[in-house]
Image (tube, helix red, strand yellow):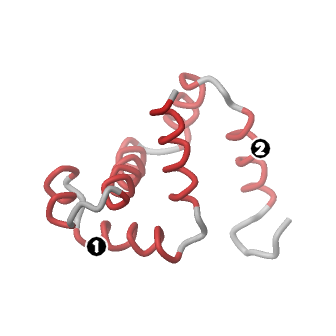
Amino acid sequence: MPANDLRTQEVEDLLDVLVAMTDKDTLFALMEDLFTIREIRESSQRLSVAVMLDEGRSYAQIAEATGASATTIARVSKCLSYGAGGYRAALEVLEQNDEA
């Protein structure tokens, strides 16, 4: 396990569960139990922002389409450019799903 204060055994257990779940309805049920409605909506919004940033849309266009604040858009943009690669991996999954 990496030496990171956030990457605890509890987080590892959650990752194991998420990786093992292949049924969308079951995964959604877990999300409903784990997260508030607001957290689910905000996380989904951030992914939409990442998609639009990757498409080259402007902050104004993204804000209008998603309702995201400039701060949220900037945070996602920074993660796309300098983050751990999670958004980029998610975008690749979405692209693969579009091709299927």
Q: Are marks 2 and 1 in contact (CB under 8 Å)?
A: no
Location of residue 8 (image quadrant): bottom right
The residue depicted at 18 percent of the width and 59 percent of the height is 63
Q: Which residue is mark 2?
A: 16
**Is the residue marked by circle 2 packed among few (<14), some (14-19), or many (20+) residues within 10 Å?**
few
Residue 36, position as x, y percentages in the image: 43, 44
The residue depicted at 23 percent of the width and 70 percent of the height is 70
- The amino acid marked with disc number 1 is Thr
| On-image quarter of the N terminus | bottom right
- Above or below, 19 against 54 in this view is above
Disc 2 secondary structure class = helix
Task: Tell me the distance, in whole angstroms, between the alpha carbons under discs 2 and 1.
Answer: 31 Å
Q: Which residue is mark 1?
A: 71
The residue depicted at 22 percent of the width and 51 percent of the height is 66
Q: Which mark is residue 8?
A: none
Residue 93, position as x, y percentages in the image: 55, 43
* Residue sitting farthest toward the right: 1
In the rendered structure, the answer to whether residue 46 lies left or right of residue 5 reads: left
Of residues 49 and 25, which is closer to you in this image?
49
Residue 61, position as x, y percentages in the image: 16, 58
The residue depicted at 49 percent of the width and 32 percent of the height is 99
- The amino acid marked with disc number 2 is Asp
